[in-house]
Amino acid sequence: MSHERYAAIWKKMDSHGKGHNFTNRFWEMIEAALNDNLHDLFVPKKDEFTMRLAHDDDKHWYNETKKLADRPLGEETKLKRARHVRDNAKGFVADVTVNAASGFPVNVRYRRSGESSTTAFREVMKFLFKFADDSSAPNLSGKVEIAADRGYWNIDTLVFCVGRLGAGVVGTIKRGMKWFPFTWGEKKQSSTQRGVKTQQYVQAEGQPQI
């Protein structure tokens, strides 16, 4: 497929609902249809069994053209445009929640403009467990366990998951957080002038282990 044909398809898709008040964009409709089906098929009833979920972000590359008219997706498309530092590329971010054992998705949600990983995570949980705000949050104690990397487990997200939802959490914690001042004998590597690697202890307050 030529670049012109590829771009034309995306522009056609992006034009749906464009400029209409209170109308979802085409990508929002596809996302909603997918997640409604995934929810009906793979989110268990509250008393059926413990649900173990893994949550992470999927970074999509999107190379913007210099000319605005040549861009397949307009600036007002609501999608958040982010720079993926590790990949040294720009693009979109999809927060994907899957069953921990099978890896099969139960929710795929693209971040909107202005959203952080914390706010996006909360929106996913609100959709999966059908509540509007913290005051109406269900008690998921013993029903749901959520695994995520340390980028998600900041204070706000931990308070939300453990304090509000009662869900179990699995993952590591950023060293800068003072909640768990334990190092577990953590070591870091440094090289001497001759290239011989030596081990040095990481300086941290607190006991080396619980």
Image (cartoon, grey):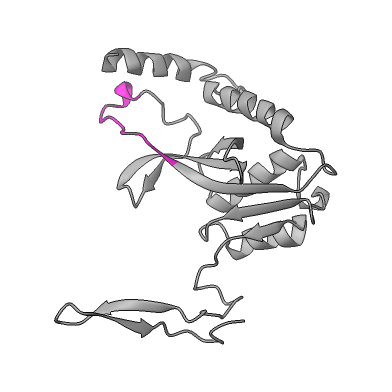
Residue under the point 53% across and 39% down? 112
| Tag count | 0
Q: Which of 198 and 56 is in front in this view?
A: 198
- Quarter of the figure with the N terminus: top left
Residue 160 visible from this viewpoint? no
Q: Which of 192 and 93 is in front in this view?
A: 192
- In the displayed structure, would residue 169 be above or below residue 180? above
State the image coordinates of residue 106 (x, y, percent, origin top left): 64, 36
Residue under the point 35% across and 34% down? 62
- In the displayed structure, would residue 146 be above or below residue 5? below
- In the displayed structure, would residue 56 be above or below residue 177? above
| Image side of residue 5 versus residue 155, left or right | left
State the image coordinates of residue 132 (x, y, percent, origin top left): 76, 43
State the image coordinates of residue 156 (x, y, percent, origin top left): 63, 61
- What range is drawn magenta here? 59-71
Residue under the point 76% across and 55% down? 165
| Image side of residue 202 versus residue 94, left or right | left
| Image side of residue 198 versus residue 50, left or right | left
Image quadrant assignment for residue 48: top right
Image quadrant assignment for residue 5: top left
Instruction: Look at the image and say whether residue 133 sits in the magenta stretch.
Output: no
State the image coordinates of residue 194 (x, y, percent, origin top left): 14, 81
- In the displayed structure, would residue 36 be above or below residue 7? below
Residue 209 visible from this viewpoint? yes
Q: Nearer the viewer, residue 53 or 63?
A: 53
- Residue farthest right in this picture: 47
- Quarter of the figure with the C terminus: bottom right
Instruction: Look at the image and say whether residue 64 sits in the magenta stretch.
Output: yes
Q: Nearer the viewer, residue 112 or 191?
A: 191
Residue under the point 27% across and 14% down? 2
